[in-house]
Each structure stands twice: as C-alpha cells, then as structure tokens.
Amino acid sequence: MKVNPVGIERTELLHKGKANNVWATDDPRFLELEASDRISAGNGAKTDVISGKGEANNLISMAIFSQLEEKGIPTHYVGPGSNAASKIVLKAEPILLEVIGRFFATGSYVKRYECQNMLEFDGVYIEYTYKSDNAGDPVIPNDAIVALGILTKRELGYIEYLTEQVAYTIRDFFAECDGKLIDFKIEFGRLPNGQIVVIDEISPDTCRILDAKTGESLDKDRFRKDMGNVAEAYHEMAKRVAGITEG
Ligand code: TMP
C-alpha cells in the first residue's frame, strides 16, 4: 500500500461529510481528505454503502489531480494520505460554488431545458451552482456570483479558464481509460496566500463517464438510477486508471 510520503500525520476528525471525511493533521497547513464508502443522491434522500468505493475514488482522484498539476493547473493536492482512501491537501477556504462542465447535455440540464438527451455542445458548456443544501444548490448566473461577492469578475474569468483546462485534461484522461466523459463537477478554494486552486475530488462520484465501446455508465449514475452493478463500476474505473498510471 502507498503510504503518506510527505510524513504528515492525521490527528482529529474535523468533519464527516456525505461521502468524505476531513481530518486535521500535525501540520496546520495541511488536511487529510478520506474518501468513504458512503454514497448518497438527491441531497441525501437516498444513501447506501458501496464496499471499496472510497479507495477506488481516491486512487482515481489522486491520479487526476497529479495530472492537473503536471499540466500547470493549480490544485490543493499534495500526495497520498495515511491509507489508500486518503490524500493530503493544502488547507483552502472553499468557494461556495459547484462548477459544472458539460460536453453533452444530460441530467439536470435536460430536465431544465427539455432538450434532446446527449446533445453535444460545441466545446465545454460551463455553469455554476450555489453550494447551499438549504437552497437546493440552485444554478447561479454569472452576474449573481459577482453581485453576491462570491467572486470578482476577474476571478470568475480565471475560474472559467481553469475549468476549460480541467475539462480537456480529464476528457483525455478518461479517453485513455476507454471512457467517454459526458460532464463533471469541480470545486475551487483559496489558499492562505489568496491563490485560487482546484479542491476536493474528481472521481466517478463527480463525473459522468461512459464506457467508450459499450456506452455503459461507469459512474454514480448507476446508483442514482438504480442500474445495478454500482460497486463493479467504481472498481472497473479504478482498475483502468491503475492500468494507465502504473503501467
Ligand atoms: P447534473 O446533470 O445533475 O447537474 O450533474 C452534472 C455533473 O455534476 C454530473 O457529472 C454529476 C455532477 N454532480 C456532482 O458531482 N455533485 C452534485 O451535487 C451534482 C448535482 C452534480
């Protein structure tokens, strides 16, 4: 098992989220993010436990964050954590937005606009939702992001630029794993020096990926839509990612 090469030890559990645990460490600059086997959909309306999901997601997320860093896209990723489901990250102040990138229209986009499912966008279509469980994470227009002081206009432009870079990087990454990226969600935070970086996770919990040959779902949609073989999908993606990163 890969163990924390940076010598940072986790100390107390700070927060138990819907799918991830956040740990303090013995160095105040760092946190440990532990992906759990918990799965939920519909803002917690439906929950379950998928054996091995945390390790699978963390392996995939670490591989993607390493790739983003290699491409010069700033992230809070530091390295593997104390177990196979954990990674060490720089502490960042989360920005209260979910940034969604879509190559094809599906999910909430199709419900909202009643358009053809899997309509292909010209490039990547980017939209934002306001992170608030109470408000139900509504879509938020660019002007409201600025008016509410969440980001300046310049920062919003920078986030849009970074999201495009992330989009093409992870589309290529999943293509190497014989996967077709449909859409994804990413989050951003601010480091203590003010730098905006990609935070959190990028995994089959936060992306829609289809098998490039069969068109089968290899992500959390299997759980959302009761399609069965949920654990198998996570394990299959982890196996493919390990194949391209270790081989
Ligand atoms: P949507 O079509 O339901 O808006 O989802 C778009 C993408 O964002 C899809 O890849 C799933 C991901 N996503 C999350 O990771 N977390 C969320 O809370 C939501 C609503 C979507």
Image: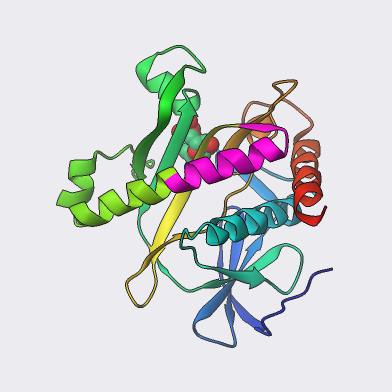
User: Residue at (64%, 71%) from the top-left corner?
Assistant: 79
Is 246 inside the magenta-drawn segment? no
Q: Is residue 133 visible?
A: no
Is 170 inside the magenta-drawn segment? yes
Q: Quadrant of residue 219?
A: top right
- The colour scheme used here is rainbow
Depth check, front residue: 235 or 175? 175
Q: Is residue 117 above or below residue 219?
A: above
Q: Quadrant of the N terminus?
A: bottom right
Q: Is residue 29 visible?
A: yes
Depth check, front residue: 132 or 239? 239
- Principal SS element in the magenta part? helix
Q: Position of residue 140 (x, y in %)?
A: 28, 40
Q: Is residue 162 above or below residue 120?
A: below
User: Residue at (81%, 37%) from the top-left corner?
Assistant: 232
Left/right placement of residue 52 relative to residue 48 reads right
User: Residue at (32%, 72%) from the top-left corner?
Assistant: 194
Q: Position of residue 64 (x, y in %)?
A: 61, 53
Q: Position of residue 172 (x, y in %)?
A: 60, 40
User: Which segment is the magenta one?
Assistant: 165-180
